[in-house]
Amino acid sequence: MEGEIVKGKVEKLIDYQGFASYKKQLLKGKIWITNGVVYVKDDPGVFPTLQIDSAFLNEIIVTKNGKIMTEDMLAISEKDDISIEVINGKVLPRCIVTTNEQQLKAYIEVEPGYEITRKIKNALLARKVTLTVEEKKTITEKVSIEEIRQALREANVFYGIREEVIIMASQAEEPIIYEVATGIPPQDGKDGFLEMKVDLNIKNLLLEDERGNIDFRESSEIPIVETGELLGIIHPPQQGNTGISVTNQPIKPKSLKSITFYSENGTKLHGNRIVATRSGRPRIYQKDHIVKAAIIPKFIQKGNVNLTTGNIHFFGDVEIKGEVEENMVIDAGSNVIVHSSIRNSTVTALNSITSGGNSENSILSVGEKNTVIVQLDSYLRTITEQLEEMYEILEQTAKSASYKNSESKQSLKSIFKFLLQHSFVKFTDVAKNYIELVYQEKDFLKKEWQITAEQLRNLLFEVSQLDITLTQIKLLISLMHTIQEMNLLDFEESKFIYIASVSNSTLLCNGNIHVYGKGCLNTTIEAQGKVVIGGYLRGGNITSKEGIKANIVGSTGGVKTVLSVPAGSTIQIKKAYGGTTIHIGYKQLNLMDIQENITAFLDVKGNLVLK
């Protein structure tokens, strides 16, 4: 028994010695922290490292061998004397007032004062440990009500203050943000607007019957008004309400827009009511807050147009209930409707041409006058800009003391002519071009263009002893601005040609062209919009900016038919014969055989693709 007991004691002693040896080996080259004390065990070739937490570089002071360390990382050994000092902190109570961009809300951010107690955090043994701290915050002082009120005063917050929020903020035990004041937002009013009292839509005019023909008996559905009829009411802006900011300042509602109205032929403004002064088709355009109203007169030719009736030149709509015979001219300032065919004639309209018959050896043009307006507008903008500059020079000269006191002062006319000859040398040429074009196209231009041209002519070329006046020039500038504003609306009405069939003709349009009947033979078509050919398309050149859609193109005989669109547009053909040429951008494709249900376009690489 004794031997066994002794043996047991020896085994326990051996186990203890083995553990001590293992522990010693485990600690070698390691560093650890316990209860604020740094421990380290050396190991040849290994340098235990202490890393100070970057968040507490100013709160932890490490002294190594009597020297305060400035580095945040240091190697230590058993020979080093390491001491650590932790700095506690104190934060004063904080109160900040801010407002939103509109100053309709004020916010208060409060944070109570507190003390921070820090102690070194234990770290497990490792070759590298981080020296950091644990923090404990103890509230010592809350934000007072008076401090909050003072912060509001400094931020100029005086309106809509919520007293209950001030009390809540003064009792806060953690950082928090409250909405402390609320203003009154402005109530926006309503812009002026136009209330329409007539229907402007042309009903049933372009409806086809079962065979694809237009029933012109429905043309009476074009809206017509009589003299004295109410067209619309212009309502003034409805003012909104002013708001109040938290700084007790007024906040104005958004500015309102009034309707600017231009009365043209056949309309008049009585108070705020637009009234027709003659019978005809009402036309009211609106762009933003600019409104223009006119009554378009309508000329009706009950039979054919021929040598007996003579050519027709009419400012408004023209309706021909028969056909247009050979060598006749129809020129309309709005729309043209021809119930039957057009032969060897020229038909021009500003807005549209509609025909229920065939156009043979004729020229049909829509929107050509718009190019005149564009050119006139370009001239007028240059004239207005330079005339405004000359007006400023003349006004400054007339107001100057040296000019007023001069005994031999020049007339404004002589100064004006001097400016034309030396500083604005191109002005006269542009004005001449404008005047000539206005007189050339006067039958289709509104009176304002002609009045401006006449006043310009008087200003530049009138031989008179009378001096010009600043008022005269200012009124002319005002009239020019008025015309430019009105011109914004001149292109709003859609342009189109809508016709049953065409042969050996030329169709030109600033909008869409639709041949809805039998088709198109040996014809040139140029459209700024889309082209749609419902029947056959044989021979000729078709050009469209917005795409072409055709039913049957070419013929078995291989007649050359060319279709052209710019890059970005497509050509759709239900059936194309050989001899059809497709142009898209700078790419060309000649079809040699029959192709069906094709869509031609340029891919992303610029290649012409048939799909």
Image (tube, rainbow, N blue to C red):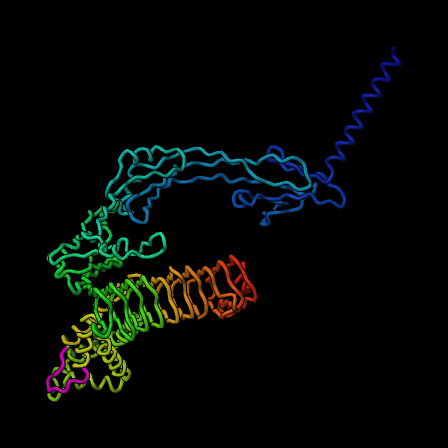
Depth check: 81 or 296 in front?
296
The x, y position of residue 378, in whole percent, is 29, 73
Q: Which residue appears at 17% of the width and 60% of the height? A: 280
The x, y position of residue 313, in whole percent, is 22, 72
Task: Indicate whether 121 appears above or below 537.
Answer: above
Furthest residue in direction bottom, as rendered: 408
Q: Which residue appears at 42% of the width and 36% of the height? A: 114
- 43 left or right of 505? right
Depth check: 500 or 549 in front?
500
Total count of labels: 0
Depth check: 352 or 112 in front?
352
Q: Quadrant of residue 123?
A: top right
The x, y position of residue 311, in whole percent, is 23, 73
Task: Indicate whether 403 appears above or below 606.
Answer: below
- 353 left or right of 452? right
Q: Quadrant of residue 282?
A: bottom left
Question: Which residues are drawn in magenta?
Answer: 459-469
Q: Is residue 300 visible?
A: yes
Furthest residue in direction right, as rendered: 3
Q: Which residue appears at 27% of the width and 74% of the height? A: 328
The x, y position of residue 214, in whole percent, is 31, 57
Q: Quadrant of the N terminus?
A: top right
Task: Indicate whether 10 appears above or below 463.
Answer: above
Furthest residue in direction top, as rendered: 1
Q: Is 400 a magenta residue?
A: no
Depth check: 401 or 536 in front?
536
Q: Is 462 a magenta residue?
A: yes
Q: Is residue 268 visible?
A: no
The secondary structure that dominates the magenta segment is loop
- 178 left or right of 475? right
